[in-house]
Every structure is written in C-alpha cells, then in structure tokens.
Image (cartoon, rainbow, N blue to C red):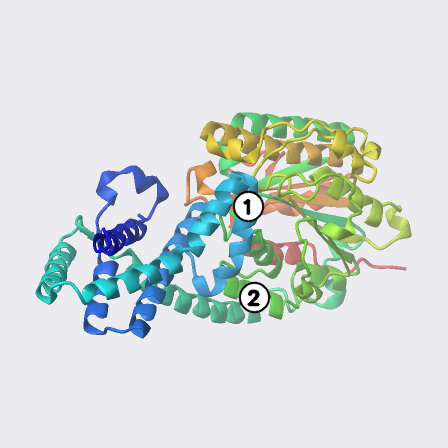
Amino acid sequence: MTRTWPWLAAIGLSLTLVIAFNQPQSLAELGHLASWRLPLEPMTALLVMLLLPGRIFAALVALVMGAMLWLRLGDQLVWQWMGRPFTAIFDIPLGLSLVEIGFAALGWPLTLGLAFAALVVLPLATALAWTWQARLAQAPRAALLGLVAVTAVLFTYDRLQPAPFLTTAHGFDQLRLQVERSRAALDARRVWQTAYAVDPVKDIPADHLLTGLRDKDVLLLWIESLGRSALTLDPFKDQLLARLEDFEADLEPLGLAAASGWLTSPTIGGQSWLAHATLASGVWTTNQPSHRQYLQDARADLAHLFARAGHKTVLGMPAIVSPWPEVHHLGFDQWYFADHFGYRGPTLEWVTMPDQYTLWALENAERALPLAERQPVYLQVALISSHAPFTPDIPVVEPWELMGDGSIVHDLPKDGGAPRDVWRDHDTLLAAYTRSIDYTYETLQSHTRRYANADTLTILIGDHEPASRISGTTDERAVPIHVISGDPGLLEPFLDWGFTPGMTPTDASAEYLMTAFRPFLAQAFSGPPPATN
C-alpha cells in the first residue's frame, strides 16, 4: 500500500487537473459529454518536467498551469456576467466586486466554496508537479516519451481538422488571448486620448454655452440594468410597458410631456461607469484603460459644461462605499456617496439604499429652495435598486415625507426571497428583475408627480442591458432614454432629433450611440444669450 499510494495520488491529481483544464467556453456546456476532451497543457507540463528535472522547474510549471486556470475561470465569469472578454491586466481589480455580487446572489457558502476553489488552484498544480517529479524518476523513460509522443501526434492530427473534437488547449489559448487583449486595450487607451482631443463643442463661446438651459434644473438619472430587452421581450415587456403607459397618463394633467428614444451603450451586464463616462465625455469608453484615461483627462464633460453655464453641478452615487479621489476631476461642485446621504435604513442586499430615498435626500439637500432663490442645478444620479441581485423588492412610500431618514425602510415589507433562491430558479430570477425595474420606474413616476415642472428637464437613461442570463442576448446594446418637462421648448430639440412623443420608445424612435448625446445637448441648447435691456 505504501508503494501504491504515491501513484494513486499522482493519478488522482492528474485527473483533477485534466477536469480543471476541460472548462469549456460556456458554463452551459459542462453537462455535454462532447465538451470533455484531452487537454494539452498537462501533457506539455509532463514533457517539460521530463526534460528539465528539478524543484525550480516544477515550481515554474505549477505557476504557469495555475495562471492558465485562473485566467480561464476569470474569462468565464466575466463573459457570463458582463458579456465581454476578460483582460487580466485591467480586470483583476473587479475580483472583489464579483465576490460581493456572489455573496448577494449565491449566498456565502457557495461563494466561499468558489473562492476556496480558486485559491487552491496553485497549490493543486504545485502538488501535482512535485508528485509527478517524484514519480518520473521511477517510471520507464521510454513509456513516458511514448505517452508524450502519442499525445503530440493526436493533438497535431486533431488541430488539422476543421473542427477539433478530441483535444483542447484552453490554457494556451487563454495566454494568447490575454496578450492580444492587453495590446488591444492599450491601443484603446491611445484611441481614447486621440478621440477626446477632437471636441465638437469646444468652439461654442462661453456666453453661448447651454443658454437654453441657463435657468433650468437638469436632472440626469441613470436606471441600473435597463436595456431595450426590458421593453421589447417576454417576460418583462407586459409589466413594464403597462408601467410606462401609466407613467405617461400622469403627465398631461400636471402640464408635463415626454419624449423617448434609444441610445447605444458601450457595455452590457455591468460596469455602468463605462456608460457614464461615454455619455459624459462623448468618447466611446468600452474598457478599463479607456475609463482610467477618462478619469485622468476629464476636463470638458457634461458636468464641466454645465458648471461653465452657471449651474451647480451635483453627483449622487449611493453605491460608492470607498474613497474615490478621481471624482475631483469630473467637474462636480458637490458629490454624495453612500455615507453622505444620512440614510438610517437597512441595506437591501447589494443595494445600499432604495432609489426613493436617494432622490428624496438629494431633493431636500439641493432643490428644496425655489429656483429663484438659488443656482440652477445639474444633478446626475446613479439609481441602483434595479442592480443585481434584484431582491428584496419594497413598495414606494407615499407621501414622500414619511421617508424621513430612511428608518421606515426597516418596517416595509420585503418580498422576493433570498438571493440564492432567486438566482437558483431562472423564471424566479426574471420575475425579480422585472419587479426591480418596475420599482425604479414607479419611483420616478412618483418623483415626477412631486418635483417636475416647467423649470426642470428630467432625463432618464438606462445604463446597459442586464447579464445575458437575464436578457438572453449578448448582442443588444440599446438602452431607453426618456426626457420629461413642463416646458415644450425643452422637448422640441429631442423631437427634432428623432425621439417619439411619450414615455415609450418604439421601433420608429431614433437610436444614437451614447457618444452623440453630449454634443447634441450642447449644440441644441447653446446659442446667443437673450437680449437684455
């Protein structure tokens, strides 16, 4: 038994590594027998250790195999959640965010299990390498070389087929992809800098800038995880289109009107900040290098333009719970992060506070006085109640004064179930997502009844499609945009731009890249200042 045990350990570790390297491109493929093939990476490692014995080479082999597995797992998670490729040199900081989402959506036991599995990849590869090394000295050299030769021939033959079906090289493919993506990402950063240098609104004279909005409050409210699929696909559309019809029916008795269209977002499934940066800067921002460049170079985005036009610029980001020094570059006079809202209610899983409280606190802090007694405000807010895990859902509080410091949320009914239960069943997940979007629209409907008027332009924009598991697509990038005001003159430029009247964008509504919004707004509402006596 003593002599047999090391060989059993080597075989067991080898099979574990073969299974690990067999991770298919999609997690959905795990259940298909055709997805399981012979991976090249362990056989290559065996050959290296056969030709280069020694603990140092064993450690290097283990490090490379561990890195391959980590990269493969990261690529799968980012594809599943965000619908885009994983670029390690820029996306590794997202790891903590994925863990936070995992705790909310999957519960701590499963999340800790996945985290533990990721942590043991390198020790597993190291243990296997050292076990192999000890066994190689005892194995017949001819047999080992024969095994490697057979594998090489098999792999070469399989690679020559139009569709390889016997072998895989996911690990080596991932190393190649990371090099290609890193180069592309660095190129994207240079492209972003070049695009930002060409500003279509830089020649607007300072005294002409946004004169059409000079004495108006402008509210730009981002709706988390809202894309075209929510308004056009089952099972979401019936409930949400009914909500928009009800929303629109409220407007006319209040002297308000709306127009709606579509914008194309640079991201899907997450990373809302890429959409925020694209809209604000007018430059297509699709990855972390570009976003970092935006944070460095921002000097003429929407907040800067409104500040130059005489508005007080305010940013509301209730999801930010850590220091964010880059906010100083973005042109805001005042900003509110999670700790600045004075919220005394409970967190709602990932969501730090409900959307209604976010808007209530900001209205009280920045727009409580009549417009004649203060500066006009440009208020940009990221609403987060429709962020994953989409549970629990709570009712809108009426009247708003009952919201107080948010303590009432402790006593509100919280329906929908635990995140791990919601995400375990696909139909339950889709229903939870629909309810979360409906809650945000209902909150905005109530907010419009209370705060909208002829001196306010309210802009509601989805940031991106939800994860492909919810939307069922990784190709759709369009998001709805609605504009609301009691001043018809504020809606007219949007109608001329191709928006359709009302709260429901249709196939006839214009669709533009998100980059087009900033120059449109600046050019449509800028002009000679009104004559004065």
Image x and y of residue 200, in percent: 59, 65
What residue would you read off at disc 1? 101
Residue 262 appears anywhere in the view: no
- The answer to whether the residues at label 2 and label 1 have Cβ atoms under 8 Å apart is no
Q: Name which residue type carries label 2.
A: Arg
The quarter in which the C terminus is drawn is bottom right
The vertical placement of 251 against 203, above or below, is above
Identify the residue at horizontal 52%, vertical 31% (top origin): 421
The vertical placement of 57 against 101, above or below, is below
**44 or 430: which is nearer to us?**
44
Identify the residue at horizontal 58%, vertical 36% (top origin): 390
207 vs 166, left or right, is right
Identify the residue at horizontal 86%, vertical 48% (top origin): 371
Residue lying furthest front: 2
**257 or 515: which is nearer to us?**
515
**310 or 146: which is nearer to us?**
146
What residue would you read off at disc 2? 292
**169 or 481: which is nearer to us?**
169
176 vs 385, left or right, is left
Image x and y of residue 36, in percent: 24, 45
Q: In what element is the residue under mark 1?
A: helix
Q: Nearer the viewer, mark 2 or mark 1?
A: 1
Q: Residues within 10 Å of mark 2 (few under 14, many from 20)?
A: some
Residue 249 appears anywhere in the view: yes
Identify the residue at horizontal 89%, vertical 50% (top origin): 372
